[in-house]
Structures are given as structure tokens and as C-alpha cells.
Amino acid sequence: MLKHLRWLAAFMVLGALMAVFYAPAPMVPLLYDDYLRLYSNPLLTKNGVSFDELFSFSRPLVDVLYMSAAHITGAGATGEAMLRFLHHINIIVHALAALLLMASLARAFGTAGSSWPPFLAAFVAAVFWMLHPLQTESVTYIYQGVEAMSGMFFFAVVYASMRYFESVAWKWSVLAVLCAVLGGGIKQTLMVAPLVVLLYDRCFVSGAFVRALRVHWRHYSLLGGALFAWFFFWGLKGDNTAGFQASDNPAHWYFFNQPAVILQYLKLVFLPVDLCFDYEWKMSRDIAALAPSIVAVAALLGAGLYALLKCSGARAGKAWSAAAFLTGWFFITLAPSSSLYPLKDLAVEHRMYLPLAAPAAALGLGVHRLVINWLKGRFGAPVVVAVAFVLLAALAGLGLGTYSRNLEYLNPRGLWEDVVRQHPRNARALSWVAYYHAGEGRLSDALKYYRLASEVDEDPVSVLNIGRIHDKLGDRKKALEYARKAIELNKKLVGTSKYKHTFQGEGGVKVGQTPEDLLGF
């Protein structure tokens, strides 16, 4: 009974912390991809959607959620009630994900999570992970809530697999497969879940990969087979959004640039200042400049491989097993976005949603060993209490940082202006600042920022938007001049990821239209 009560209390505390530090989140308006996935989503404007239409997208369960939200709230795709509903869903999902992470870590830290030290260590790790400012983008930004939803199912797969290894009860294996399929319908990153489960099996249960596969082959066959089938039939659809769309980045240079990105992620884990909504990380082709970061990340990966060699299941002791598992978790969950598959953006904060669990778990283990195994025996209870207060202050600091970051999200123009402050030559940020100035009636400021964006990256959309601002200012001649220039520029980009099948913005006019049509004359 006590065991169930403490888990209920843990969830209530996690929920209360989310309610406090994410209090501004439900008021955050649409941001960036939200316009495409909500405002311009054809499935949300139709009276009926066929099965084929729904599953023509690579993330069908996301659209099911959005259609359900629209039906429940009775609001349109961008109605205030629907947006608040989706914000609350993201907050609840993040709290549930933290609870599942805590449950998984408690089982990894101890014997079936039955004793208090592993429970407390897992709780510290879950709070650190949940309240870290890096997670704001995956919770407060509506569409990137897909990261939190897929993450919740990812943790559920790991937890259910752990329970299966302990009991060999098929209900846990079936639950793991079900969660994997549901998570795969939200984001393709669930494809690496079997690898994390196998690594856990190797480090804490079987002691060897071969033995793990031999003993639990049915579980891995079901889990891997279900995910492969899902990914093959629906995960390769052509509508891949934001991160997983076509990229002109060469695969090898993308790979060599990722160590620097990973070091930036790690820096933000321990010093979460100057978070950025859009890094637009520039591709470097200077191998000498990239070498230090490559060596540093290779050393970290090598340390994890060394720990893997040193551990042999539970017999080797928890330290080596934990080091191997957490290092592996970090790199495996980062692999879909930080390896050889080139994505449009080199660095995005929401990609740390799952990998952040590794340093969070390391913190939980470290605090447990420091307080329980060392300080308590040498200095007594007063020092332990003092350390506990320092830890609470640090976690509160993370929470306040997250609260502050949520306040920044309330002002989209300010959010993009902060990006420009950190990265003055970020064309995308300049264009969005211009967009918000135009929406607020400051046409001169909008024209200034659109021109700056065009100087950095002469994109057809930014050029067309300059024409649209001139049209609003009453200069039709210049407006037509820029519209023609945008059309000609777009023709030159055929075959690249920058080619625009439609000019996004007012009307989404097709490229084949005349300059007059593009400007709405």
C-alpha cells in the first residue's frame, strides 16, 4: 500500500510543479510550424476525413488528436479554446512522461524499484528532466508537443519492457508493442526504442547482447517487427515536416558538424542560458575547425563503450552498467537527428527531449551516491540536510528558468527578435520579425526586416513579401517588380529543397500564377 501511495504522491508533486512552472503556457499563441500543422491543415477544415486521407500523412495520430480537439472544443483550427486544450494536453503528457521516466529509472537504479534510495534518486532525475528549460520547446510550442507525446510512449515502451524482463508476462510485452505503435504514429524516433531496450537488457538483465536476443527473442521480434511495419507503410510518407523534410546538406558534412551541435546541447544541459528558438546552425566544411568537437564527442562515446565492455549484467555492479546504459541512451536517442541522415536544421532544442534523460539520470544517481553512500556516513544528518536544500534550490532555479522561458513564448515577435539578437544573420528569424511587424501595422519596420532577410538569403518568399509590403504602402510598380523577381528566382531553385511549390503567406498562391495574381490584384 505504501508503495502505491508514494507513487501517487510523486505524480501529484510532478503535476503540481508542472502547473506552477508552465502556468503561462496555455496562453501562448501559434508559432512557426503551428501555422502549417493547424492553421493550414486541410484535415481540420473538412466535414469528413477518410481513412486513406488520414493515413496519407506520416504522423496520422497527431492529426487525429487535432481533429479530436477541434470536435471537443467546437472551435476552429486556431480557435482560442482549441489552442488552450492542446496546450493543456502537452502539459499533462509531459507530466506523465516524467512519471514514466521516474518509474523506469527506479527499476534500473534498484531491485524492481522497491527501496527508497532508488525511488528518491529517480524522483530527483525526473524533476530535473521535467523542469529543465530545454524542454520548454517540446511542451509550450504546440506542434512540437509531438516530441513530448512520442517521448511519453518511448518511456512507456522502456518501462513495459523492463516489467516483461522481470515477470516474463506477455501482457507487458503486448503493452510495449502497443505503445511503440502509438508512438510511431506520432513521430518516427520510436524506431530506436528497441535498441534502448536491448541495451538495458544487456547492461542490467542478460549481461550479453547474444544472450539477451536468445532469451527474449519473441519480445524483440514483436517490438521490432511492429515498428518496422509501421515505419515502412506510414513513416516514409512524403509530407515529412520541419525537421524530416528534404535537405541539401551533404550527409557526410552533416555528420561531421553534429559533434559541435552535441557539445552545444550538453552545454545547455548544465548552463541553460541563451536558449534559442531557431539556431539556423551554419554548415561548416572546415574539418580542422570541426576536429576538436569530433574528438571530444568520440571520447565521450569511447568512454561509454569502455563501460559497456567492463559491465557484464548485474554481476559487474551497477556503476559500469549505469554508465554504459546512460551513455548509450544519450547517443541512441540522438541518432535519428544527429547522425548521417541530413535534416534541414542542424540544431534544434526539442531534439534533446529524450537524450536529456541520460544526464538527468546521472544526476539522480550522483546525488544518491553522494548523499547516501558518502556524506551520511562521514558527516551525519546536518550535512545531508544542507545538501538537500542546495539540490532543492537548484531544481527551483531550473523551474524558474522554464517559467521565464514560457513568458518569452507569450510574445512571438519578441521570441524571434531574441533569435535575431543572438544570430543577426538568421534569415528565417528576420522574416518572422518582419511578418509580426506587418501584422501589427508597422509596414516600414516590416520592409526593413524583409530586406535584411533577403540580403542574407534571397529566398523567393522573402522577395515576394517585400513586394507585398510595397503594395500595402501604395507602390504597385515596385510591388510587381519584386513579384516578377520572386517568380524568376523560384524557377532557378527547381530541384532544390528551397524551391517553393507554393508561395506561403497571404493566399498561398501557386507558383504558376502571374505577378498580379501573387499580389492579389
Image (cartoon, rainbow, N blue to C red):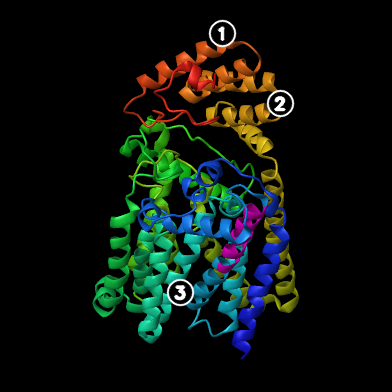
Magenta range is: 81-96
Identify the amino acid type marked 3: Tyr
Which residue sits at x=67%, y=28%? 437
Q: Nearer the viewer, mark 1 or mark 2?
A: 1
User: Could you tell me which quadrant the C terminus lies in?
Assistant: top right
Which residue sits at x=47%, y=67%? 155
Identify the amino acid type marked 2: Gly
Mark 2 Cα shell of 10 Å, populated few (<14), some (14-19), many (≥20)? few
Q: Where on the picture, by quarter, is residue 117?
A: bottom right
Q: Are marks 1 and 3 in contact (CB under 8 Å)?
A: no
Can residue 474 be seen here? The reply is yes
Q: Is residue 108 above or below residue 432?
A: below
Label placed on residue 159 = 3
Can residue 356 be seen here? The reply is no
Question: Is residue 83 highlighted in magenta?
Answer: yes
Q: Earlier in the sequence, mark 2 or mark 3?
A: 3
Label placed on residue 441 = 2
Residue lying furthest top:
477
Label placed on residue 477 = 1
Question: Is residue 443 highlighted in magenta?
Answer: no
Identify the amino acid type marked 1: Lys
At which x and y percent is residue 454?
A: 52, 20
